[in-house]
Image (cartoon, rainbow, N blue to C red):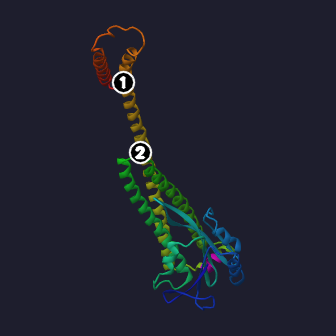
Amino acid sequence: MIKRYAIGKGMILNSDARDSNPLWIHMIDPDEEEVDWGKRHFGLKSSFVYDALDVNETSRMEVGEGQLRILINIPYKEEKGKFVSYNTVPLGMVLTERTLFTVTLRENEIVDKVAESKRDDLTDKVRLMFHMMNETVSYFLKYLKEIENESTVIEDYVNKSLKNEELIKLLHLEQSLVFFSTALRSNETVLQKCLDLYNSKEVNERSNTVKNMIKISGEHKENFKEVMIESRQAIALIDIYTNTLSNTMDVFASMISNNLNIVMKFLTIVTITLAVPAIVTSYYGMNIYLPFQDHPYMYLWIIVLSFVIAVVVAFLIGKKKF
């Protein structure tokens, strides 16, 4: 699927490729024909597009053929029955002289929000790219807050029930934090590399392409710094949440083990308490002559004796505080 937008007058509108305004072309899981269309009309590098469709692709930056190609990972939330999982998916951004291309494997809330923006300052493709990066970090922070709230709710349930379902939910949240941490750190590396190339005093194709494509103004630099600061803040929060969640899971695992030990101890005490009277009753169940077996109330004495023995055994075990 291909969506075309025109950038200008602070509006992002549906457009076709013939529009004179700078274009934003967004590709969602494009097929071979759509990739070939982008290659023929805009010089889009097909290998980069296919890399952006690989869920295991890491963030990176490429410069060449008069294009700046940036691959970052953006977060998304997915509900699977009772479980909510958070993951990341690559987003490829290709900046040409007049067009911003974005490529992703699936529809994403971040891209949809940017497409519906009515901000007056989104007047060129560079501002749009920075806005998309800023929204990406904002959604990382948003989902981190949701993960924190979800883990707090699960902790309350675990304290009461200690069911496997709650522990599995915590495991999913911990995995989400790992995905987020990897994505944010690699995204930050790409942003820093892009800024270093722009500030580089070396004259070469890579630095010249970055400077010509981005043309960072004072306002752009502030936006860039804001994205970097929020990205580092999100990484710091992830480290805190990961340590907290890991410690929480360790505590709950210890609680489950301790509760299991308590149950096993109780069952062992019951077994021992009942085993001694069982010996007495089984002894008088043998088909041989036994003392007092002809007594008319012998069965009552056996019951009383078994009960007394059980009480004594239970008292001794309790006194020893096993």
Q: Is residue 240 magenta?
A: no
- Locate residue 56, reporting x and y percent: 62, 61
**Distance of label 1 from label 2 (alpha carbons):** 33 Å
Q: Residues within 10 Å of mark 1 (few under 14, many from 20)?
A: some
Residue at x-position 54% and y-position 84%: 124
Please identify the quadrant where the N terminus is shown: bottom right
Q: Is residue 209 magenta?
A: yes
What residue is shown with label 1?
274
Foreground of the two, 227 or 222: 227
Q: Secondary structure at mark 2?
A: helix
In front of the other: label 1 or label 2?
A: 1
For residue 17, what is the image quadrant?
bottom right
Residue at x-position 47% and y-position 68%: 139
- Locate residue 212, reporting x and y percent: 62, 80
Amino acid on which disc 2 is placed: Phe
Question: Where are the magenta residues, as a range?
Answer: 208-213
Residue at x-position 67% and y-position 70%: 50
Left or right placement of residue 260 versus residue 202 in this view: left
Task: Determine which of the numbered discs, if any, sits on residue 252 in the image.
Answer: 2
Foreground of the two, 121 or 149: 149
Q: Secondary structure at mark 1?
A: helix
